[in-house]
Amino acid sequence: MSSQKKLVVAHAPYWHDGSKISTKNYHIMIAALPAVLMGISQYGAPALGVIAFAMACAMIWEVVWNLILKKPASVGDGSAAVTGLLLGMLMPATAPWWVIALGTLIAIIVAKQIFGGIGFNPLNPPLLALAMLVISFTGIFDFNESLRHYDLGFVMTYPLADLKAFGPDAISKFGLGDLFMGRQAGAIGSTFGLGLIVGGLYLMLRGHMRWEISLSFLAGVFITALLFNLSDSAKYAGPLFHLFTGYTLIAAFFLVPEDSSSPANFIPMLIFGAMAGMMTVLIRNIGAYVDGVVFAVLLMNLCNPLLDKIRPKAIGKVVENA
Amino acid sequence: MSSKNGQALAFALAAILLVVGVVCYAAFPQKTPEEPVRLMLKSTAGKILFDHKTHTDDAGYGIACDDCHHEEQDESQSCSGEDCHGPDSDPKRGDALHTNCKGCHEDSGAGPVECAACHIM
């Protein structure tokens, strides 16, 4: 037998469900449809414009990057389309076209391609783009301001902004059922809780998403919010309010479990999700920002390589040239 | 699906979405309604979200336009009248809003009067 090494593999459990990357990405788009359609039905053509333009821009930036670097076209894998779709879902329906163009440029080029493309990005691309946009253009992402011309027949103030500014007394006007069914102001694709959960379950059942990260994130949000609420219910909102408002559910099912920026091992996945959930509520309750999801997840993305050092001991021993 | 078909599908999708996006932005620009729904007032003490529709709508508080807007009032009337913004005043917008808003809220025993109940600090 030849002593030449035939295969060199690294650690980490590998997970293959037999499908291609493009198949997975098209399934993610299908899973996001209920929440997107609800947003479009509420805000009409402007919301459709934001979603369509974001997806188109993301794919165009990817093609442009491939052309500049003379790399083979990668737009067919659907990754850029998903990035554009998710960024569009995080935007208000009133987002101007140039914010979409800039946001998708950041998501595709700065957050993903500079690091080597799909599978190499250390941070979640739509969230990094959103973080930079939120810091740069606060007025556009103040949902109370950007949606001030809309009257959709339900309470149109942004629930998390009301909580931050006026405390739990101000949120008694929001029914949990209404929040869950998308009858709340917010980003185009992040308000319809039922649709996001259905989409998330679809991805879990099809094996396209790690349930460990999603569920631990939701548990992190729930438990931390519950502890705050139990400590002082006059100052902090209950856990279900935190689950059904802001970016919580879209993050749980579409953003936190993103492959490249999340851990691969079981225990790290649980820690990653739970810590991101905990940080989300910490930022919401005692931080400066109205919604903590964006920065909480990005912070945990940075911890991802460290967390993945916690890994199971290899069974047996390595025999050289076995 | 072969990778060539995948590329073709992606290019077709991008082209369709680009057309849809551009048409939506061009044909349905953001318009300010003739009568505002809500107003985001900005001040050094923080933003204030004012629900204009609830205050003017008959199903809401039914306040008449000229109770607040004086653009069409008789020129002989003064802004600093006893009934409006207080005597000896040359009201700035903030003073006028404070007197009008808080005054009405206090008189009717409804609505916020504390600073932090309106101003988003």
Image: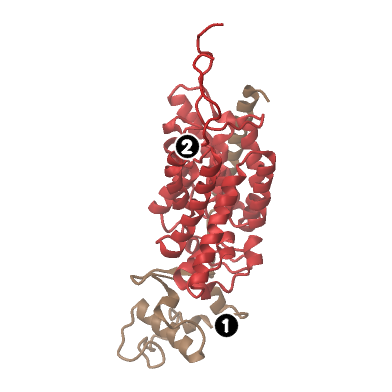
Chain colours: A red, B brown
- The secondary structure type at the circle numbered 1 is loop
Point 66% across, 43% down: residue: A204
**The N terminus of chain A sits in image quarter:** top right
Residue B85 lies, with reference to residue B6, above or below; the image says: below
Residue A36 falls left or right of residue A160: right
Q: Is residue A127 visible?
A: yes
Residue A3 lies, with reference to residue A279, above or below; the image says: above
Front-most of A186 and B41? A186
In the rendered structure, which amino acid carries the disc numbered 1?
Gly
Front-most of A314 and A261? A314
In the rendered structure, which amino acid carries the disc numbered 2?
Ile
Callout 2 and callout 1 share a chain: no
Front-most of A105 and A217? A217
Quarter of the view holding residue A258 = top right
Q: Which residue is mark 2?
A: A108
| Residue furthest front as drawn | A316
Q: Which residue is mark 1?
A: B62
Label 1 crowd (10 A; few <14 / some 14-19 / many >=20): few
Label 2 crowd (10 A; few <14 / some 14-19 / many >=20): many
Point 47% across, 40% down: residue: A107
Residue A3: horizontal and vertical position, in percent? 51, 8
The chain letter under disc 1 is B
